[in-house]
Protein backbone atom coordinates (compact mmCIF):
# COMPACT_ATOMS: atom_id res chain seq x y z
CA UNK A 1 0.00 0.00 0.00
CA UNK A 2 1.25 3.46 -0.88
CA UNK A 3 1.34 6.00 1.92
CA UNK A 4 -0.75 9.15 1.66
CA UNK A 5 0.99 12.45 2.08
CA UNK A 6 -1.15 15.57 2.35
CA UNK A 7 0.24 18.96 1.40
CA UNK A 8 -1.93 22.01 2.11
CA UNK A 9 -1.05 25.23 0.36
CA UNK A 10 -3.80 27.87 0.39
CA UNK A 11 -6.46 25.21 0.42
CA UNK A 12 -4.87 23.05 -2.27
CA UNK A 13 -3.53 19.59 -1.43
CA UNK A 14 -1.84 16.60 -3.00
CA UNK A 15 -3.17 13.22 -1.94
CA UNK A 16 -1.62 10.00 -3.31
CA UNK A 17 -3.53 6.76 -2.99
CA UNK A 18 -3.80 3.04 -3.67
CA UNK A 19 -6.66 0.62 -4.19
CA UNK A 20 -8.40 -0.91 -1.22
CA UNK A 21 -9.10 -4.62 -1.27
CA UNK A 22 -12.67 -5.89 -0.97
CA UNK A 23 -14.06 -6.95 2.40
CA UNK A 24 -11.44 -5.10 4.40
CA UNK A 25 -12.63 -4.00 7.85
CA UNK A 26 -13.25 -0.30 8.45
CA UNK A 27 -9.89 1.43 8.70
CA UNK A 28 -8.83 4.16 11.11
CA UNK A 29 -9.01 6.61 8.20
CA UNK A 30 -12.61 5.60 7.45
CA UNK A 31 -13.59 5.95 11.09
CA UNK A 32 -12.17 9.48 11.26
CA UNK A 33 -13.64 10.46 7.91
CA UNK A 34 -17.07 9.18 8.93
CA UNK A 35 -16.91 11.24 12.13
CA UNK A 36 -16.01 14.38 10.17
CA UNK A 37 -18.70 13.59 7.61
CA UNK A 38 -21.38 13.42 10.29
CA UNK A 39 -20.20 16.71 11.78
CA UNK A 40 -20.23 18.24 8.27
CA UNK A 41 -23.87 17.23 7.72
CA UNK A 42 -24.94 18.73 11.04
CA UNK A 43 -22.96 21.89 10.24
CA UNK A 44 -24.71 22.29 6.87
CA UNK A 45 -28.11 21.89 8.52
CA UNK A 46 -27.24 24.56 11.08
CA UNK A 47 -26.03 26.97 8.38
CA UNK A 48 -29.32 26.31 6.61
CA UNK A 49 -31.11 27.94 9.54
CA UNK A 50 -29.51 31.24 8.48
CA UNK A 51 -30.16 30.90 4.72
CA UNK A 52 -33.34 29.16 3.59
CA UNK A 53 -31.83 28.28 0.18
CA UNK A 54 -28.68 26.65 1.55
CA UNK A 55 -29.97 23.11 2.25
CA UNK A 56 -31.31 21.89 -1.07
CA UNK A 57 -31.99 18.33 0.12
CA UNK A 58 -31.62 16.25 3.26
CA UNK A 59 -32.65 12.63 3.72
CA UNK A 60 -30.41 11.57 6.58
CA UNK A 61 -31.39 10.78 10.19
CA UNK A 62 -34.21 13.02 11.41
CA UNK A 63 -32.54 13.38 14.80
CA UNK A 64 -29.65 15.22 13.15
CA UNK A 65 -31.87 18.19 12.34
CA UNK A 66 -31.05 21.06 14.71
CA UNK A 67 -33.63 22.62 16.98
CA UNK A 68 -35.28 25.74 15.63
CA UNK A 69 -33.57 28.96 16.59
CA UNK A 70 -34.92 32.45 17.07
CA UNK A 71 -33.06 35.20 15.28
CA UNK A 72 -33.02 37.57 18.21
CA UNK A 73 -29.79 39.41 17.67
CA UNK A 74 -27.48 36.53 18.55
CA UNK A 75 -26.78 35.63 14.90
CA UNK A 76 -23.30 37.16 14.97
CA UNK A 77 -22.31 34.97 17.90
CA UNK A 78 -23.85 31.87 16.27
CA UNK A 79 -22.02 32.60 13.01
CA UNK A 80 -18.76 32.80 14.95
CA UNK A 81 -19.46 29.48 16.66
CA UNK A 82 -20.26 27.82 13.34
CA UNK A 83 -17.10 29.28 11.82
CA UNK A 84 -15.10 27.79 14.69
CA UNK A 85 -16.75 24.40 14.09
CA UNK A 86 -15.82 24.59 10.41
CA UNK A 87 -12.21 25.49 11.19
CA UNK A 88 -11.98 22.59 13.62
CA UNK A 89 -13.18 20.12 10.97
CA UNK A 90 -10.73 21.53 8.42
CA UNK A 91 -7.91 21.21 10.95
CA UNK A 92 -8.86 17.61 11.61
CA UNK A 93 -8.72 16.86 7.89
CA UNK A 94 -5.35 18.54 7.64
CA UNK A 95 -4.04 16.27 10.39
CA UNK A 96 -4.35 13.20 8.13
CA UNK A 97 -0.67 13.13 7.23
CA UNK A 98 -0.17 9.39 6.65
CA UNK A 99 -2.99 7.00 5.89
CA UNK A 100 -3.72 4.25 3.43
CA UNK A 101 -6.62 5.02 1.10
CA UNK A 102 -8.36 3.90 -2.05
CA UNK A 103 -8.84 6.17 -5.02
CA UNK A 104 -12.48 6.59 -4.07
CA UNK A 105 -11.53 7.57 -0.52
CA UNK A 106 -9.15 10.15 -1.94
CA UNK A 107 -11.99 11.64 -3.97
CA UNK A 108 -14.06 11.67 -0.80
CA UNK A 109 -11.32 13.48 1.11
CA UNK A 110 -10.96 16.16 -1.53
CA UNK A 111 -14.73 16.55 -1.80
CA UNK A 112 -15.21 16.99 1.96
CA UNK A 113 -12.36 19.47 2.18
CA UNK A 114 -13.75 21.62 -0.63
CA UNK A 115 -17.27 21.41 0.78
CA UNK A 116 -16.04 22.62 4.15
CA UNK A 117 -14.10 25.48 2.58
CA UNK A 118 -17.27 26.57 0.80
CA UNK A 119 -19.24 26.29 4.06
CA UNK A 120 -16.71 28.58 5.69
CA UNK A 121 -17.13 31.03 2.81
CA UNK A 122 -20.91 30.90 3.12
CA UNK A 123 -20.65 31.72 6.82
CA UNK A 124 -18.35 34.63 5.98
CA UNK A 125 -20.90 35.96 3.48
CA UNK A 126 -23.97 35.64 5.68
CA UNK A 127 -22.01 37.35 8.45
CA UNK A 128 -21.71 40.41 6.24
CA UNK A 129 -18.39 39.63 4.54
CA UNK A 130 -17.85 40.75 0.96
CA UNK A 131 -16.08 39.07 -1.94
CA UNK A 132 -15.83 39.92 -5.60
CA UNK A 133 -17.85 37.78 -8.02
CA UNK A 134 -14.78 35.74 -9.03
CA UNK A 135 -13.54 35.37 -5.46
CA UNK A 136 -16.96 34.17 -4.39
CA UNK A 137 -17.35 31.62 -7.20
CA UNK A 138 -13.86 30.25 -6.57
CA UNK A 139 -14.49 29.83 -2.85
CA UNK A 140 -18.03 28.45 -3.17
CA UNK A 141 -17.82 26.40 -6.38
CA UNK A 142 -14.09 25.80 -6.91
CA UNK A 143 -14.05 27.54 -10.29
CA UNK A 144 -13.86 30.96 -11.97
CA UNK A 145 -15.80 31.85 -15.11
CA UNK A 146 -13.88 33.33 -18.05
CA UNK A 147 -14.40 36.99 -18.92
CA UNK A 148 -15.03 38.09 -22.50
CA UNK A 149 -14.77 41.59 -23.98
CA UNK A 150 -17.89 43.17 -25.44
CA UNK A 151 -16.41 42.77 -28.91
CA UNK A 152 -16.69 38.98 -28.53
CA UNK A 153 -20.45 39.24 -28.19
CA UNK A 154 -20.77 41.86 -30.94
CA UNK A 155 -19.21 39.45 -33.45
CA UNK A 156 -21.78 36.79 -32.58
CA UNK A 157 -24.60 39.32 -32.90
CA UNK A 158 -23.39 40.18 -36.39
CA UNK A 159 -23.82 36.54 -37.44
CA UNK A 160 -27.32 36.49 -35.99
CA UNK A 161 -28.12 39.80 -37.67
CA UNK A 162 -27.38 38.24 -41.06
CA UNK A 163 -29.40 35.13 -40.24
CA UNK A 164 -32.64 36.88 -39.30
CA UNK A 165 -34.69 38.84 -41.84
CA UNK A 166 -35.96 42.35 -41.16
CA UNK A 167 -34.58 45.40 -39.42
CA UNK A 168 -34.36 46.62 -35.86
CA UNK A 169 -32.64 45.24 -32.81
CA UNK A 170 -31.50 41.63 -33.08
CA UNK A 171 -33.08 40.81 -29.71
CA UNK A 172 -36.50 41.99 -30.96
CA UNK A 173 -36.25 39.99 -34.20
CA UNK A 174 -35.19 36.88 -32.30
CA UNK A 175 -38.08 37.30 -29.88
CA UNK A 176 -40.51 37.65 -32.78
CA UNK A 177 -39.06 34.58 -34.51
CA UNK A 178 -39.06 32.47 -31.34
CA UNK A 179 -42.74 33.25 -30.79
CA UNK A 180 -43.45 30.72 -33.55
CA UNK A 181 -42.08 27.97 -31.29
CA UNK A 182 -43.91 28.57 -28.01
CA UNK A 183 -45.58 25.52 -26.50
CA UNK A 184 -49.28 26.34 -25.91
CA UNK A 185 -50.04 26.17 -22.18
CA UNK A 186 -52.81 23.62 -22.69
CA UNK A 187 -50.33 21.28 -24.39
CA UNK A 188 -47.37 21.84 -22.09
CA UNK A 189 -47.97 18.85 -19.85
CA UNK A 190 -48.35 16.47 -22.81
CA UNK A 191 -45.18 17.76 -24.46
CA UNK A 192 -43.12 17.76 -21.26
CA UNK A 193 -44.33 14.31 -20.17
CA UNK A 194 -43.42 12.90 -23.59
CA UNK A 195 -39.98 14.53 -23.41
CA UNK A 196 -39.17 13.26 -19.92
CA UNK A 197 -40.37 9.74 -20.80
CA UNK A 198 -38.04 9.73 -23.81
CA UNK A 199 -35.13 10.98 -21.69
CA UNK A 200 -35.86 8.30 -19.11
CA UNK A 201 -35.99 5.56 -21.74
CA UNK A 202 -32.68 6.64 -23.25
CA UNK A 203 -31.01 6.86 -19.84
CA UNK A 204 -32.18 3.44 -18.63
CA UNK A 205 -30.54 1.82 -21.64
CA UNK A 206 -27.18 2.81 -20.18
CA UNK A 207 -27.60 3.43 -16.43
CA UNK A 208 -29.22 0.94 -14.09
CA UNK A 209 -31.44 2.65 -11.54
CA UNK A 210 -33.42 1.16 -8.64
CA UNK A 211 -36.78 -0.19 -9.89
CA UNK A 212 -38.68 2.02 -7.46
CA UNK A 213 -37.09 5.31 -8.61
CA UNK A 214 -39.70 7.84 -9.59
CA UNK A 215 -40.63 11.50 -9.89
CA UNK A 216 -43.59 13.85 -9.84
CA UNK A 217 -44.03 16.95 -11.98
CA UNK A 218 -45.63 20.20 -10.82
CA UNK A 219 -46.26 23.39 -12.80
CA UNK A 220 -45.63 26.49 -10.69
CA UNK A 221 -45.42 30.28 -10.95
CA UNK A 222 -43.64 33.20 -9.30
CA UNK A 223 -40.18 31.59 -9.29
CA UNK A 224 -36.82 33.09 -10.36
CA UNK A 225 -35.83 29.86 -12.17
CA UNK A 226 -37.25 27.92 -15.13
CA UNK A 227 -37.17 24.47 -13.55
CA UNK A 228 -36.13 22.87 -10.27
CA UNK A 229 -35.52 19.36 -8.96
CA UNK A 230 -36.34 18.87 -5.28
CA UNK A 231 -34.78 15.53 -4.43
CA UNK A 232 -36.61 13.94 -1.51
CA UNK A 233 -34.47 10.84 -0.95
CA UNK A 234 -35.46 7.19 -1.39
CA UNK A 235 -35.01 7.61 -5.16
CA UNK A 236 -37.82 10.17 -5.54
CA UNK A 237 -37.78 13.69 -7.02
CA UNK A 238 -40.30 16.49 -7.24
CA UNK A 239 -39.67 18.31 -10.54
CA UNK A 240 -41.17 21.78 -10.84
CA UNK A 241 -41.57 23.68 -14.10
CA UNK A 242 -42.10 27.43 -13.91
CA UNK A 243 -44.76 28.74 -16.28
CA UNK A 244 -44.32 32.46 -15.59
CA UNK A 245 -42.90 33.01 -19.08
CA UNK A 246 -43.41 31.31 -22.44
CA UNK A 247 -41.74 27.91 -22.77
CA UNK A 248 -40.25 27.20 -26.19
CA UNK A 249 -40.30 23.79 -27.81
CA UNK A 250 -36.59 23.10 -27.26
CA UNK A 251 -36.96 23.76 -23.52
CA UNK A 252 -39.05 20.61 -23.10
CA UNK A 253 -36.04 18.33 -23.67
CA UNK A 254 -33.74 20.79 -21.88
CA UNK A 255 -35.81 20.67 -18.71
CA UNK A 256 -36.65 16.97 -18.94
CA UNK A 257 -33.01 15.94 -19.30
CA UNK A 258 -31.58 18.56 -16.93
CA UNK A 259 -34.01 18.11 -14.05
CA UNK A 260 -34.72 14.44 -14.67
CA UNK A 261 -32.84 11.98 -16.88
CA UNK A 262 -29.85 11.81 -16.97
CA UNK A 263 -29.62 15.04 -14.96
CA UNK A 264 -30.41 15.94 -11.37
CA UNK A 265 -32.75 13.05 -10.57
CA UNK A 266 -30.28 10.44 -11.80
CA UNK A 267 -27.32 12.21 -10.15
CA UNK A 268 -29.02 12.26 -6.76
CA UNK A 269 -30.26 8.67 -7.04
CA UNK A 270 -26.76 7.41 -7.89
CA UNK A 271 -25.12 9.36 -5.06
CA UNK A 272 -27.72 8.14 -2.58
CA UNK A 273 -27.43 4.51 -3.64
CA UNK A 274 -23.68 4.22 -4.26
CA UNK A 275 -22.23 6.51 -1.61
CA UNK A 276 -24.79 7.03 1.16
CA UNK A 277 -26.63 3.68 1.24
CA UNK A 278 -23.86 1.34 0.07
CA UNK A 279 -20.78 3.01 1.58
CA UNK A 280 -22.43 4.72 4.53
CA UNK A 281 -20.92 8.07 3.56
CA UNK A 282 -23.38 10.31 5.35
CA UNK A 283 -22.14 13.54 3.77
CA UNK A 284 -24.20 12.52 0.75
CA UNK A 285 -27.43 12.64 2.73
CA UNK A 286 -27.33 16.43 2.50
CA UNK A 287 -26.94 18.76 -0.45
CA UNK A 288 -25.55 22.22 0.30
CA UNK A 289 -26.69 24.29 -2.66
CA UNK A 290 -23.93 26.91 -2.49
CA UNK A 291 -21.05 24.45 -2.71
CA UNK A 292 -18.72 22.75 -5.21
CA UNK A 293 -21.25 19.94 -5.56
CA UNK A 294 -23.53 22.29 -7.48
CA UNK A 295 -21.03 22.88 -10.25
CA UNK A 296 -20.87 19.13 -10.85
CA UNK A 297 -24.65 18.80 -10.53
CA UNK A 298 -25.51 21.62 -12.92
CA UNK A 299 -22.65 20.92 -15.32
CA UNK A 300 -23.48 17.22 -15.64
CA UNK A 301 -27.20 17.99 -15.97
CA UNK A 302 -26.51 20.32 -18.90
CA UNK A 303 -23.98 18.01 -20.54
CA UNK A 304 -26.36 15.10 -19.99
CA UNK A 305 -28.67 16.56 -22.66
CA UNK A 306 -25.92 16.02 -25.21
CA UNK A 307 -25.15 12.55 -23.84
CA UNK A 308 -28.78 11.45 -24.11
CA UNK A 309 -29.32 13.02 -27.54
CA UNK A 310 -26.08 12.77 -29.55
CA UNK A 311 -25.74 14.40 -32.93
CA UNK A 312 -29.00 15.26 -34.68
CA UNK A 313 -31.13 12.80 -32.68
CA UNK A 314 -32.58 15.52 -30.48
CA UNK A 315 -33.65 17.71 -33.39
CA UNK A 316 -35.20 14.69 -35.10
CA UNK A 317 -37.14 13.72 -31.96
CA UNK A 318 -38.39 17.24 -31.44
CA UNK A 319 -39.45 17.71 -35.07
CA UNK A 320 -41.03 14.26 -35.43
CA UNK A 321 -42.68 13.97 -32.01
CA UNK A 322 -42.80 17.17 -29.95
CA UNK A 323 -43.65 19.66 -32.70
CA UNK A 324 -46.83 17.78 -33.70
CA UNK A 325 -47.86 17.36 -30.04
CA UNK A 326 -47.49 21.11 -29.54
CA UNK A 327 -49.27 21.87 -32.82
CA UNK A 328 -46.24 23.74 -34.18
CA UNK A 329 -45.22 24.17 -37.80
CA UNK A 330 -41.87 22.55 -38.67
CA UNK A 331 -41.27 24.52 -41.90
CA UNK A 332 -38.89 26.94 -40.18
CA UNK A 333 -37.49 24.45 -37.66
CA UNK A 334 -34.08 24.20 -39.33
CA UNK A 335 -33.65 27.99 -39.15
CA UNK A 336 -34.70 27.87 -35.51
CA UNK A 337 -32.09 25.27 -34.56
CA UNK A 338 -29.38 27.11 -36.48
CA UNK A 339 -30.27 30.24 -34.52
CA UNK A 340 -30.14 28.28 -31.23
CA UNK A 341 -26.65 27.01 -32.06
CA UNK A 342 -25.47 30.61 -32.48
CA UNK A 343 -27.25 31.69 -29.30
CA UNK A 344 -25.28 29.09 -27.35
CA UNK A 345 -22.14 31.09 -28.13
CA UNK A 346 -23.59 33.93 -26.04
CA UNK A 347 -23.95 31.85 -22.87
CA UNK A 348 -21.19 33.63 -20.95
CA UNK A 349 -22.84 37.01 -21.50
CA UNK A 350 -25.05 36.21 -18.52
CA UNK A 351 -22.02 35.51 -16.35
CA UNK A 352 -20.47 38.82 -17.36
CA UNK A 353 -23.73 40.58 -16.52
CA UNK A 354 -23.82 38.97 -13.07
CA UNK A 355 -20.14 39.78 -12.43
CA UNK A 356 -20.49 43.46 -13.28
CA UNK A 357 -23.76 43.86 -11.41
CA UNK A 358 -22.69 42.08 -8.23
CA UNK A 359 -19.32 43.83 -8.25
CA UNK A 360 -21.16 47.15 -8.29
CA UNK A 361 -19.93 48.24 -11.72
CA UNK A 362 -23.39 48.27 -13.30
CA UNK A 363 -26.74 49.28 -11.90
CA UNK A 364 -29.96 47.34 -12.53
CA UNK A 365 -30.89 49.17 -15.70
CA UNK A 366 -27.41 48.75 -17.22
CA UNK A 367 -27.51 45.03 -16.40
CA UNK A 368 -30.95 44.61 -17.94
CA UNK A 369 -29.84 46.43 -21.11
CA UNK A 370 -26.83 44.10 -21.39
CA UNK A 371 -29.00 41.00 -20.95
CA UNK A 372 -31.44 42.24 -23.57
CA UNK A 373 -28.67 43.09 -26.02
CA UNK A 374 -26.19 40.24 -25.56
CA UNK A 375 -28.21 37.44 -23.95
CA UNK A 376 -30.99 38.37 -26.40
CA UNK A 377 -33.73 38.26 -23.78
CA UNK A 378 -36.99 40.11 -23.70
CA UNK A 379 -37.04 42.76 -21.00
CA UNK A 380 -39.45 40.58 -19.02
CA UNK A 381 -37.06 37.64 -19.11
CA UNK A 382 -34.08 39.90 -18.30
CA UNK A 383 -35.91 41.07 -15.17
CA UNK A 384 -36.50 37.43 -14.21
CA UNK A 385 -32.80 36.68 -14.77
CA UNK A 386 -31.83 39.63 -12.60
CA UNK A 387 -34.05 38.23 -9.84
CA UNK A 388 -32.09 34.99 -10.13
CA UNK A 389 -28.75 36.79 -10.00
CA UNK A 390 -29.74 38.76 -6.92
CA UNK A 391 -30.87 35.64 -5.10
CA UNK A 392 -28.28 33.09 -6.21
CA UNK A 393 -25.37 35.38 -7.09
CA UNK A 394 -22.30 33.62 -8.57
CA UNK A 395 -24.25 30.35 -8.81
CA UNK A 396 -24.85 31.28 -12.46
CA UNK A 397 -21.39 29.97 -13.45
CA UNK A 398 -22.38 26.40 -12.64
CA UNK A 399 -24.54 25.98 -15.72
CA UNK A 400 -22.18 26.92 -18.55
CA UNK A 401 -18.75 26.66 -16.96
CA UNK A 402 -19.86 23.50 -15.17
CA UNK A 403 -20.94 21.95 -18.44
CA UNK A 404 -17.64 22.92 -20.07
CA UNK A 405 -15.59 21.35 -17.25
CA UNK A 406 -17.64 18.14 -17.25
CA UNK A 407 -17.55 17.89 -21.05
CA UNK A 408 -13.78 18.38 -21.23
CA UNK A 409 -13.20 15.80 -18.49
CA UNK A 410 -15.37 13.14 -20.15
CA UNK A 411 -14.00 13.72 -23.64
CA UNK A 412 -10.41 13.87 -22.40
CA UNK A 413 -10.92 10.41 -20.94
CA UNK A 414 -12.27 8.92 -24.14
CA UNK A 415 -15.98 9.69 -23.86
CA UNK A 416 -16.28 11.36 -27.24
CA UNK A 417 -19.22 11.46 -29.62
CA UNK A 418 -17.49 8.70 -31.62
CA UNK A 419 -17.70 6.37 -28.62
CA UNK A 420 -21.12 6.91 -27.02
CA UNK A 421 -20.89 3.82 -24.81
CA UNK A 422 -17.63 5.07 -23.29
CA UNK A 423 -19.19 8.49 -22.83
CA UNK A 424 -22.11 6.99 -20.91
CA UNK A 425 -19.69 4.92 -18.82
CA UNK A 426 -17.60 7.93 -17.76
CA UNK A 427 -20.71 10.05 -17.28
CA UNK A 428 -22.14 7.47 -14.88
CA UNK A 429 -18.83 7.25 -13.00
CA UNK A 430 -18.79 11.01 -12.57
CA UNK A 431 -22.36 10.99 -11.25
CA UNK A 432 -21.61 8.18 -8.81
CA UNK A 433 -18.44 9.51 -7.18
CA UNK A 434 -17.34 12.53 -5.10
CA UNK A 435 -16.11 15.14 -7.57
CA UNK A 436 -14.99 18.78 -7.60
CA UNK A 437 -14.23 21.16 -10.45
CA UNK A 438 -10.49 21.32 -9.71
CA UNK A 439 -10.40 17.54 -9.42
CA UNK A 440 -11.73 17.16 -12.95
CA UNK A 441 -9.03 19.34 -14.51
Image (cartoon, rainbow, N blue to C red):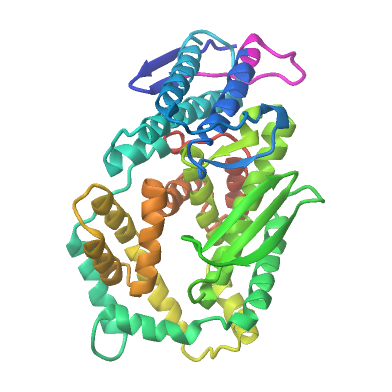
Give the answer, above or below, for where 256 lies relative to 125. below
Give the answer, above or below, for where 48 lies relative to 63. below
> Residue at the spot x=64%, y=16% of the render?
30
Q: Is residue 75 left or right of residue 136?
A: right
Q: Residue furthest front?
A: 72
Tell which of 113 and 41 is nearer to you.
41
Which quarter of the figure is the C terminus placed in?
top left
Q: Main secondary structure of the magenta part?
A: loop
Q: Which residues are magenta?
A: 15-31
Q: Where does the image place residue 101, in percent across and percent down from the top left?
A: 59, 17
Give the answer, above or below, for where 179 lies relative to 432. below
- Looking at the image, can residue 128 be seen? yes
Residue 185 in magenta? no
Q: Is residue 149 left or right of residue 146?
A: left
Which quarter of the figure is the N terminus placed in?
top right
Tell which of 303 and 421 is nearer to you.
303
Q: Is residue 133 left or right of residue 182?
A: left
Tell which of 320 and 285 is nearer to you.
285
Q: Where does the image place residue 147, in percent across and percent down from the top left?
A: 25, 51
Q: Where does the image place residue 438, in percent across and percent down from the top left?
A: 41, 35
Amino acid sequence: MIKIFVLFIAGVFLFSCSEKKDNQPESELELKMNKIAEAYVKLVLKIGQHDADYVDAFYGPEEWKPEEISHDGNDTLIHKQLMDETDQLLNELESFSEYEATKLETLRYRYLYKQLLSAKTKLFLISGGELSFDEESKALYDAVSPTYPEEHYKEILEKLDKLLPGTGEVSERISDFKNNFVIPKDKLDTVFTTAINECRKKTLRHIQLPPEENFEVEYVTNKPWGGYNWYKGDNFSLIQVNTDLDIYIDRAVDLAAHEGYPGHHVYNVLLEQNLYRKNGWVEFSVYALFSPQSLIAEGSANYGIEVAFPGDTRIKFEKDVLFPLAGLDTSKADEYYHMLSLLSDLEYAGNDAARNYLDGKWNKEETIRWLVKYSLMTREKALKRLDFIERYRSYVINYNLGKEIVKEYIERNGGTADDPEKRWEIFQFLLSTPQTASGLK
